[in-house]
Amino acid sequence: MATDTEQLLRAIYAQPRLVFEHLHPDFVCHSPGPNPMAGTFRGAKAFAEHLGTYQERSQGAFALGAPVAVMADGAWATVVTPINGSRDGKAISMFGLGVWRFEGDKLAEHWECVSDQQQWDAFWS
């Protein structure tokens, strides 16, 4: 039986704009790697700009698929999802792992992880 946390994350991945209704005021997103998408993004505005950059740089050709697994335990949750995109003659197809930390019922922190960091870095560079 799915937990409330799992249901919330599935809803957010189905309708990404929902994430902004559930962010903690001090929300932080961590995106790794030596690529233009990498960095630490603090607050809803910075996170929204970060997400928008994925679409801008790919001219709308970047997408997360429906989660294939959502696991939650207390204040922590992970979401495994397919990632597909294209830009500047390059294509990407891999899995992503989103690690989420909750404070109460709010999303406080997020780590973006990918199954092939070198491919991810080359795609966005």
Image (cartoon, rainbow, N blue to C red):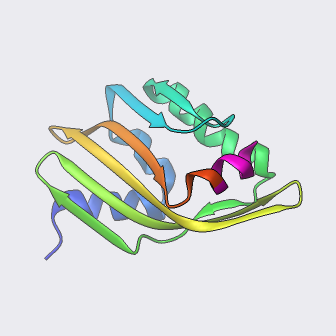
In x, y percent, where is residue 27?
Answer: 36, 29
In x, y percent, where is residue 76?
Answer: 20, 48
Observer-nearest of 14 and 99: 99
User: On screen, 114 above or below 112?
Assistant: below
In x, y percent, where is residue 98?
Answer: 40, 53
State left or right for residue 64 relative to residue 81. right
Residue that sits furthest to the right in the current view:
89
State left or right for residue 7 relative to residue 121. left
Instruction: Kindly indicate the quadrant of the structure image that contains residue 87.
Output: bottom right
Residue at 40% in and 65% down: 80
User: On screen, 32 above or below 45?
Assistant: below
Observer-nearest of 108 and 39: 39
State left or right for residue 59 relative to residue 28. right
Q: Quadrant of the C terminus?
A: top right
In x, y percent, where is residue 14?
Answer: 46, 65
Residue at 48% in and 27% down: 40
State left or right for residue 85 relative to residue 76. right
Majority secondary structure in the magenta region: helix
User: On screen, 23 above or below 63?
Assistant: above
Residue at 22% in and 41% down: 102
Magenta segment includes 124:
yes
Q: How many marks?
A: 0
Magenta segment includes 60:
no
- What are the residue bounds of the magenta stretch? 119-125
Q: Quadrant of the N terminus?
A: bottom left
Observer-nearest of 5 and 75: 75
